[in-house]
Image (cartoon, helix red, strand yellow):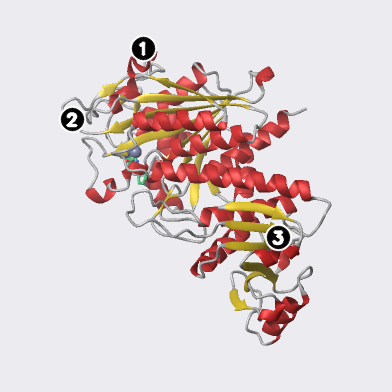
Amino acid sequence: MKLNIRNKIYKIQKADFLILGVYENKELVDVPEDIQKIILYYKTEEKFKGTCEEMIYFTLPAEVGFREVLLLGLGKEKELSSEKIRKILGKGMKRVKEYNANSIDLLIFENSQVCLKRMIKAMVEGILLSNYQFTKYKGEKKKKGLEEVNLVYHGEDRLEDAKEALEEGIVLAESTILARDLVNEPANVLHPMELAKEATRIGKESGFEVEILEKDVIHSLGMKAFLEVARGSSNQPKVIVMRYFGKPENKEEILGLVGKGLTYDSGGYSIKSNEGMVTMKADMGGAASVIGTMSAIAKRKLSLNVIAVIASCENMISGDSYKPGDIIGSMAGKTIEVLSTDAEGRLTLADAVYYTVTKEKATEIIDIATLTGAVLGALGTTTTGVVTNNQEFYKQLEVASIVSGEKVWQLPSFEEYKKLIVSDIADLKNIGGKYAGSITAGLFIGEFVENKPWMHLDIAGTSWSDGESEYISKGGTGVTVRTLYYLAKIKSCKTRN
Ligand code: BES
Ligand code: ZN
Ligand code: ZN
């Protein structure tokens, strides 16, 4: 689908659909008189009030220049937000698709609360993300669908800003889609080697460097905990290292992103039920998010240094698999008592974060992982749980999350929780008991970050959707790509002189 900015409504004659946003409490300006009259008619007849997410469709008489119009209710002007815009557009686009629209003119909504750039980005995200479907393996391909959307901008003065926002919005939506595609790919296709290939391809396309560490190198680095998890699979583990130096003159500041990259999690000998296993191709949602984020950062050429690391493997069963009761080592030298082979993510991440801090010299670190079922119990499917050792860092994430619309919530990390992962016979144990599972899992990873500012994002609830909603489709959601991009952007603005 092609998206353009047009700055005059006369282009409308070319598209077969016109979409207008209408407030409950504000008149539309810059709209042809005939359309204004119709809106007024609907409003006085109370057929369409303009309340949020309300929609009405009509066809204009031929003398007006035959065309089809969809009105989208925006609610009260002061109550509109970027997230509402994404949802309204997501719903609206699904509706126009039912009418087989080929091209659309869409008037950019004007709003006193949401600035032009944010407005355009939210509109673009709503349009592109709601249009996403994973149809690669469907014999019957989806219909041709919508080809062109023109965002109509009425002013003259900020046309460049509008175009810039359009480009940024497209990059963010495409990077999110890239993450969704990776998550939706089945595990028999996307094993660690394939994930490494994809990262390499995306790196070339977007402008970041990718290095793949093979098993012998991983072994000589001493990533023992990671290798224990990988043991049961005949697919070789890979460490994927992605480097982007947007501020090469300041290599003392490096943001480290570490994504959980289990291309499949059967649970190992602590085996999952069939129901628990069926979506476990998605246990590399953190890795997908990190690759999508790197792509967005590099494409937008942000001014900061970022190193992203994925320790990718499969958690499988074989005569050589690790077992409950084993005591294993780690790159940091700490010993770990394995009480469940299904708590494997934290083992891979322990080595991955330690590698990122000590070998790649990351000065701040974020790990993103589909780590615990417990986070679903705590926060459901809408909110990512966060564990951190640094409030300042968390505040930046909160700001980024408000901009992206992807919700985050901090979980407590009191000393009492840390005691729960101390083992009687090793330095640590890989589960902390029945309760507070998301916190103890996060804190386990925190033991390997060498006291660097760190955040752990548990996306087990948010990276996968069982159903379709306004701009989210079934399957991978691509969550945290946009939040992490905005966090990087905040940092790049701070360091820019
Ligand atoms: N990959 C899972 C977590 C998960 C669960 C992700 C549901 C997405 C949806 C993780 O490796 C796991 O199995 N965690 C266990 C930990 C437990 C053994 C302490 C869990 O959450 O049950
Ligand atoms: Zn598991
Ligand atoms: Zn897992």
Instruction: Rate crowding at label 1 as few (under 14), some (14 to 19) or many (20 or more) other CA atoms within 10 Å.
Output: few
Instruction: Rate crowding at label 3 as few (under 14), some (14 to 19) or many (20 or more) other CA atoms within 10 Å.
Output: many
> Which marked residue is nearer to the observer: mark 3 or mark 1?
3
Residue 409 placement (x, y as % from top left): 53, 47
Look at label 1 and name its amino acid: Ser
Viewer-proximal residue, 348 or 433? 348
User: Which image quadrant shows ligand 3?
Assistant: top left
Question: Which residue matches tag 3?
Answer: 108
N-term-proximal mark, 2 vs 1? 1
Residue 427 placement (x, y as % from top left): 35, 22
Secondary structure beneath label 1: helix
Position of residue 282 in the picture relative to residue 392 (left or right): left
Look at label 2 and name its amino acid: Ser
Which quadrant of the view contains residue 288?
Answer: top left
Question: Which residue matches tag 1?
Answer: 220
Position of residue 377 in the picture relative to residue 70 (left or right): left
User: Is residue 436 in view?
Assistant: no
- Mark 2 to mark 3 CA distance (whole Å): 57 Å
Instruction: Rate crowding at label 2 as few (under 14), some (14 to 19) or many (20 or more) other CA atoms within 10 Å.
Output: few
Query: Residue shown at 26%/39% (left/top)?
Result: 266
Viewer-proximal residue, 443 or 319? 319
Q: Relative to 109, does residue 3 appear above or below in the rendering?
A: above
- Mark 2 to mark 1 CA distance (whole Å): 24 Å
Ligand 2 closer than 8 Å to label 2 CB: no
Q: Residue furthest toward the top?
A: 220
N-term-proximal mark, 3 vs 1? 3
Please identify the quadrant where the C terminus is shown.
top right
- Mark 3 to mark 1 CA distance (whole Å): 56 Å
Question: Which residue matches tag 2?
Answer: 318
Look at label 3 and name its amino acid: Ile
Query: Residue shown at 61%/67% (left/top)?
Result: 16
